[in-house]
Image (cartoon, rainbow, N blue to C red):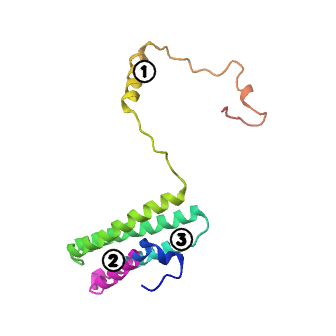
Amino acid sequence: MTEPIFDHDRLDVYRLSIGYVAAAFDVSKSLSGLHRHARDQWLRAAQSIPLNIAEGNGKRSLKDRARFFDIARGSAFECAAIQDVLVATDGLEDVASRELKRMLKRIVSMLTRMAMKFDGVREPSVDYELGNDYEHEHRDAEHEHERKPEPSRAPKAGLRDYTNGKSIVRPR
């Protein structure tokens, strides 16, 4: 590949996906006849990976970037499934498919991390103490039979406290 000009040219995942497209095109040269539809779909899905990486990397909104990286990731999964179809129908050798899937696995891993980074959905790292949770759950279960069921009745004032005169407003 030539010297990077655009930002996406510098991304390892982009360069790896270009390598996957080249390998898919090379392998697909031998596909014809009954396999031509799978071949065409495979080549479109393979090309979709670097195209969506490049487009996503050019987005200013982090959510948009994450969305395009997710789309590229989905295209990689589609390629893996198409390869399975081609192996099952004797259009692709199992050895060649496994080698290509290794590339896809690395691409998917990288895209997953990138999408999570830009999506803004994060869970803080917490050590959960499952023993304590189980202990409280068990204690509540032991005394469950001692509780009397509460009658399910409307409030004495009816729905008057919960309305604004026109429609029912749900209490928070």
Where the C terminus falls, by quadrant?
Answer: top right
Q: Residue furthest right?
A: 165
> Is residue 36 shown in magenta?
yes
At numbered mark 3, what does the secondary structure look like: helix, strand or loop? helix
Between residues 59 and 95, which one lies in front from this camera angle? 59
Task: State which tag comes first along the sequence, 1 or 3.
Answer: 3
What span is colored magenta in the figure? Answer: 16-41
Q: Is residue 123 left or right of residue 109?
A: right
**Within 10 Å of the Cα at label 2, are there few (<14), some (14-19), or many (20+) other Cα atoms?**
some
Residue 27 occupies quadrant: bottom left
59 to 146, vertically: above or below:
below
Q: Which residue is mark 3?
A: 57
Q: What label sits on residue 163 in the rendered view?
A: none
Q: Is residue 73 above or below residue 39?
A: above
Mark-to-mark CA distance, 1 and 2: 56 Å
Q: Position of residue 97 (x, y in %)?
A: 26, 73
